[in-house]
Image (cartoon, grey):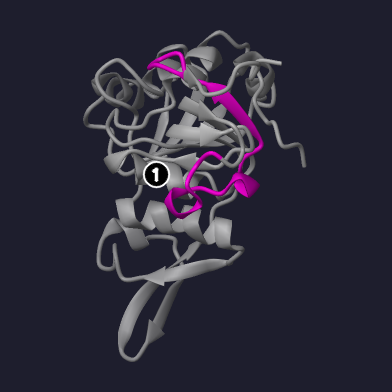
Amino acid sequence: MPKNKVINVEDAMSHVKSGMSIAVGGFIGQGDPLTLIDCLKTMDVSDLTIYENDGGYGDRGTVELVRQEKVKRIVASHVGTTPEIGNAMNEGRLEVVPTPQGTLAEMMRCGGAGLGGFLTPTGIGTIAEEGKQIVELNGRRFILVEALRVDVALIRAHSGDTWGNLVYRGTSRNFNVVAATCADYVIAEVEDLYTLGELDTNSIHTCGIFVDAVVRSNSGYCVLREEGLDD
């Protein structure tokens, strides 16, 4: 595996094709991979299925892809911060699958851990259990939820090195951490870029083994830590 995974955003995003499933990090605008989303807006792709906590905030985030009708389905814990997604759903232009936040996060985590699924009591006694397999243990009923694997993950980190080791800042860990584990191809945009070995190994939140491509963020600042890093 190459030690330098830094490539331009167009090459990284060329792995996204129509009809693919995509896990997106972020939480109501915090840690959203806006550089990658901006690139996706320029691409000729459609029929995407997005798994994320929400659709962004206001008019920024994956809601921009919905506006362009590139997305056919969103699986999210809520879309209340992006009214345009609600409008698209009500008009029949978009399928929205509401999924409890913890359930969605665990779907991604289990997919990354190689597990088949998990049992959760969340949703029992509601419409969430309709059509689902129910398992009873020790007198309690649980919904069997399958683990999630997707084609591509789009994530954002505050700091990263050329091999893809990532450090998130504050609450931007959110869905970025689990999304990075459940995809066949992971693209990470970073603000501060370091060479391999410069980051404190005890501070790394996502190991580079999960990351396939590193892109420099243009929706924040990106500092080059070594002369000649572009080479």
Task: Give the residue displayed 59% in from the left and 29% down from the top.
Answer: 214
Secondary structure found at label 1: helix
Judged from this view, the residue extending furthest toward the front is 227
In this picture, residue 166 sits left or right of residue 15: left
What secondary structure predominates along the stretch shown in magenta? loop
In the picture, residue 94 is in which quadrant?
top left
Task: Give the residue displayed 46% in from the left and 50% down from the top.
Answer: 178
10 in the magenta segment: no
- Measured as percent of width and height from the top left, residue 215 is found at 57, 23
- Foreground residue among 33 and 21: 33
**Quarter of the image where the C terminus is located:** top right
Give the residues in magenta. Answer: 198-222
Q: What residue would you read off at disc 1?
A: 175
Instruction: Reply above or below: 202 against 36.
Output: below
In this picture, residue 96 sits left or right of residue 22: left
In the picture, residue 56 is in which quadrant?
top left
Instruction: Reply above or below: 224 against 108.
Output: above
Instruction: Reply above or below: 91 against 130.
Output: above
- Measured as percent of width and height from the top left, residue 204 is found at 47, 48
- Amino acid type indicated by mark 1: Phe
In the picture, residue 135 is in which quadrant?
bottom left
Task: Give the residue displayed 31% in from the left and 51% down from the top.
Answer: 101
